[in-house]
Image (cartoon, grey):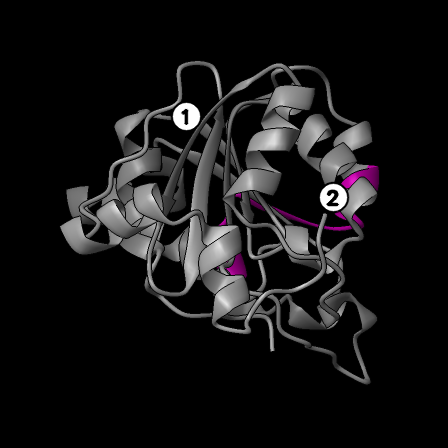
Amino acid sequence: MPTGPLSAAPTVIESVLALDPLKIVDLGMGTGKYGFLLREQRDFSANRLERADWTMSIVGVEGWAEYVQAHQRSVYTDIVVDDVRAWLQSQADVSFDVALALDIVEHFRPRDAAHMIGEALRVARHVVITTPRAFFKQSDHENPLEQHLSWWPEAALRKVAKYHSTQIVVSHDPLNVVAMLGVAPRLITGGSFKRTVRTHLIPDGVYWRLRGRTGPRI
């Protein structure tokens, strides 16, 4: 199913809105929950319910046409059915303020995901990524895009940021790694003190390997 836990939602939504974006692209929008949450917080909460009154453009890109239904169309400014990599290549530099890559990088092989992140950084000033903290198998016999093909702990995301010569800030919750890449990124998080101390004392790669929950090394 094209959905996931809500644990990272407060960090993602608050961090994106703090940037005061006018144009957002949601890469691999799935059910569209982040599009709705952003629209609800920016426009609906200000009683801008009519499409003509919206102050923020949110474009959704989805590779599996069957996922696109009326509820996404009601909150997204535009929806494109296309492979996100092909769509990104068709866009001009800095076309958007923010690109959302939420629970999508793990569906690409490492090299392909790194290239996709680079294209997202070219197209948007900021790229927000969420991805599972530990590797687990996932597949859907009807939709091959649902298969998990890679694992992205903090160290792997920092390596990609360094490769693309961009800034990165990373946070964690019990289920996800949350990262923002781009120009002077800002990530708002209220993560627990205990988890913050643990992350500094024991790197995630060691912690999860000891607990038998790591995926393939990248």
Give neighbour class at mark 1: few <14, some 14-19, many 20+ (Cα, 10 Å).
few
Residue marked by disc 1: 22
Residue 131 visible: no
Q: Give the camera-side residue of 203 and 70.
A: 203
Residue type for callout 2: Ala
Give coordinates of residue 67: x percent, y percent.
65, 70
Residue displayed at 18% across by 54% down: 194
Considering the numbered disc 1 on the image, is that residue within a helix, a strand or a loop?
Answer: loop
* Residue lying farthest to the bottom in this orientation: 141
Give neighbour class at mark 2: few <14, some 14-19, many 20+ (Cα, 10 Å).
many
Give coordinates of residue 105: x percent, y percent.
66, 50
The verdict on residue 90 being magenta is: no
The span shown in magenta is 72-86
Residue marked by disc 2: 113
Give coordinates of residue 158: x percent, y percent.
55, 32
Residue type for callout 1: Leu
